[in-house]
Amino acid sequence: MKKLFFTFVITLFVVANVYPQKLKVHTIGDSTMADYVENTTKTRGWGEMLQEFFSPDVLVIDYARGGRSSRSLYEEGIWDKVKNNMFPGDYVFIQFAHNDEKEGGKDGADGRGTAPWTTYKSFLEKYVDETRALGGNPILITPIVRRYFGKDGKITPKGCHDLGIASDDSTLNYVRVMKHVARQKNVPLVDMTALTKNFVEKLGEDITTHQLYVPTDGTHTQATGAACFAKLVAEDLKKQGILASYINSEIPLVLNPASLNFDTVYVGDVATLCFDLVGLNLSSKDGILSLSAPKNMSLSYDLHSTLQQKIDIPYSDGKLWNQSLFLHYNPANAENVNTSVTITNGNQVRELPVKAVSKEISQKTDITKSNAQLNLNGLKTTDSGTTIESGVWPKDMDGNGKRYMEFIIQNDNKALVIQQVSFILKGNVCYRIAYARGKDFYPRTDIGENQKAERTSDNQAFPVNVTVKPDERLHIRFFPWSISGGSMDFKIDDFQIQGMEIE
């Protein structure tokens, strides 16, 4: 839902007046709920799949961010953005715990870890009270399970966010705390911990590992897992009579995103977008899913494979799991495009809407810029590179929004079309890279990530399609983290943006 997120949040006033009938669902949470850049990772959050299970009368806006806890999302100001965009009657889906557990049930020095019965509980109560004060409807959603199987084939208590008993004999069970808040505040609750536990245990460890979760970690889901978990949320909401008339949980095919927008593409240039297909209940048990590209567009299985006007994908048992495709647009002339990718499965036809604006360029100059202003936040330079300010990295599965290296791009006289961001990375570091136009870095667009820290020295390059107007500033942030903890230095050399100046 990220494409709609960036379009609608920036133009909120327009949305409120052009689409007054739209009921909004705001989702807040962590990486298991967040949006991802489809062409850079297999990870998907269930929040970005949720729109597919609602009618067009509902707009889902996903504010979830990787690495955030109930505390850090609030204190970073993301919650203020949600409140500013909330109208009476809107819904807020609240899922936290994964990063609240960072310090083993204590309030963490990095602003994320929370003690369950004090800090965690108080922030859940803040979200509930402040949502209601604005006329909104809070819904508490317990966190999805981690893929921690015991020898008995069941998810372990730790996988269910129960860290055990604290020294003062109080429980460190985050799910229990959220249920307590739900009872005390009379808030509807979706017990996703129980729902996902039952779901993955029925599938078994092998299928869950390879088809639902990212195989390299036990926390994040792939497209199929995210779609299945979003469906569990929709089904439980409907069962409880919440938004029931807007929900269709029996859709045969889940698309992510639900629409594609190339924004502005210049004649002679090529733009590419990635999208997911997940078949949950296709029309026949065994068959073929056929996709046809619109005029001046083509499809491919990856960025470097053969471009095709039509692609046929076989499937079995009524399911198509974890399939991603790329749509390429090469405009021949200036035009406003409002078309679709046609997807057929027997007698079923689904259209994936596609929009674009192509423009002619009277004059252009290909350029490479490497003189970006550099800022550090939560980081410091050393003789060997850059490291965390404390000198000791926590062991993390995701980034911290307050810890980043920032590059600022500005073009004074001409419009600048940025087509690629590149740099040489040295060091065993995980990262996510994103850009935003405002100095408050909101709204942001993620353009790439590396969650494995496999390479110690490598050229990193990420395609981008963004126009920077004269005297406008573009902020590009590199959010690092460590999956091993301890001491770590990394170094970024030869940071460049490639693109063209246009008139």
Image (spheres, grey):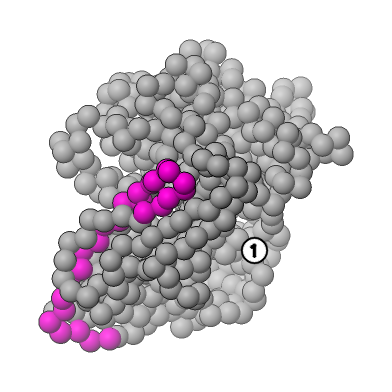
Instruction: Left or right? Give the position of 335 relative to 466.
Output: left
The residue positioned 34% from the left and 85% from the top of the image is 368
Q: Quadrant of residue 439?
A: bottom left
Specify the principal SS of the magenta part. Answer: strand
Depth check: give the residue in front, 395 or 314: 314
User: Disc 1 designates what residue?
Assistant: 452
Depth check: give the residue in front, 489 or 19: 19
Count of marks, rendered view: 1
Depth check: give the residue in front, 337 or 94: 337
The residue positioned 37% from the left and 26% from the top of the image is 246
The residue positioned 31% from the left and 51% from the top of the image is 353
Which amino acid is tagged 1? Answer: Lys
The crowd level at tag 1 (other Cα within 10 Å; few <14, some 14-19, many 20+) is: some
Q: Position of residue 494 (x, y in %)?
A: 46, 83
SS at circle 1: loop
Instruction: Left or right? Give the position of 438 relative to 162.
Output: left
The residue positioned 50% from the left and 60% from the top of the image is 312
Q: Position of residue 463 (x, y in %)?
A: 41, 71
Q: Position of residue 25 (x, y in %)?
A: 37, 32
Query: Looking at the image, can residue 480 be seen?
Result: no
Q: Is residue 364 magenta?
A: yes
Query: Looking at the image, can residue 4 be seen?
Result: yes
Find the magenta span and give its range.
342-366
Q: Quadrant of residue 154?
A: top right
